[in-house]
Amino acid sequence: MAVRDQDSLAPVEETGRGRVGPVGIILTATVLLSVTVVLLYALIQFWPPATGATAPVTGGTTTTTSASPTTTPAGQAASGATEQAAGEPAVQFFGAAINLSRDGRLFVIVLLAGALGAMVHSLRSLYWYVGNRNLRFSWLLMYATLPITGATLALIAYVVVRGGLTTTFASSQDISPFGMAALAALVGLFSRETAEKLKAVFETLLAPAEKGKDQAVPVQIEGIAPTQGQVGDELRITGTGFAAATAVQFGGVRATPTVVSDTELVVNVPEGAARGPISVVTPTGMAASTTPFIPGVVEVSQPRIDRIEPLTGAVGDPVTITGRGLDNVTDVQFSGVTTPVISKSDTEIGVAVPADAPNGPITVVVGDTTLTSERDFTVT
């Protein structure tokens, strides 16, 4: 079914491309600033006291955390986890008393610092796009998820450091919360760069992931066949990034394609198709063909190649060439190697892969016209 745009020259409007209005900008800025203030308050409240500091405990008495580790009868240093937990004062957070060990506080600090770094990224992005009057709705989801992403990446980086992949700490008492908070904040601020760095590091240790359809592949049109036709004719488009294609645009008229694969689409020429390049629309972008499509009635006598199936085969395998005006074919060549015509009609030629044929295009001679396939044939 074809749908004509009101403006035939306007591109297809995609979800989230609209600009955020004044009310939306104010609400977004208010939410981001409020979350930043809460994160700052939480970071201050959860900050661990210095080792050896006197901490108040419920009941009015005080306890002093000791920097000297206890020892077992064998003379080895004990973990002291119980004493550390007892020596840490309760965190007062919006009226609630939360008891955490020093390790627990470090985990929380890393998460909060990572989220704060991500909030700095969000606020910088917000004022830049608002200042340039180009804030779009598609960015709002990024602002909502970036603190979560920053906190998660910061926690991963912290675990990597504590796990001994880069250095080794004897206990949580040896870790400076300032250093871990700085690392976490930088990870949150540069979350994209952190993810790319972690990917590069672990691809040297693990097998790289196989590319699949869930990865965004840039959409690109390599060819269209045929380049002219009438309403209802089947058009085949080859290229890359077609797996999520949503529409094919003929000037200002759109048609719904049938996705054959990530590299091939089939669509029928819609009513009102305009002369010019054909565009394939996907969620990641839009690409236009370099060859224009010419709509209208095509004379049957005008020879052309529409499709070759299959595009790979061994010597002797049958190959079908479809198109129009092919009944007067006089020669078929596979990269210069001639093969006999087994069957022919106005729309179809049947041949076999000749011996000694190299990889390359297929050439069909019809009268005084020489036709060459847009895609190469591969001999297996």
Image (spheres, helix red, strand yellow):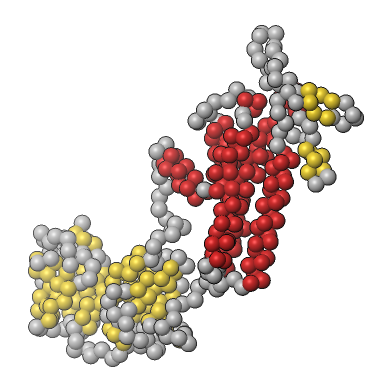
Q: Residue at x 37, y 75 (%)?
A: 279
Q: Is residue 22 left or right of residue 206?
A: right
Q: Is residue 186 above or below residue 74?
A: below
For residue 49, which quarter of the picture?
A: top right
Q: Residue at x 60, y 22 (%)?
A: 170
Q: Residue at x 46, y 72 (%)?
A: 246
Compare residues 88 and 71 and report the one nearer the observer: 88
Compare residues 260 and 62 and report the one nearer the observer: 62
Compare residues 41 and 216 and report the one nearer the observer: 41
Residue 267 coordinates in the image, percent (x, y)? 38, 78
For residue 73, which quarter of the picture?
A: top right
Residue 348 coordinates in the image, percent (x, y)? 22, 79
Q: Is residue 70 left or right of residue 294?
A: right
Q: Residue at x 32, y 85 (%)?
A: 275
Q: Is residue 202 above or below residue 39?
A: above
Q: Residue furthest front?
A: 131
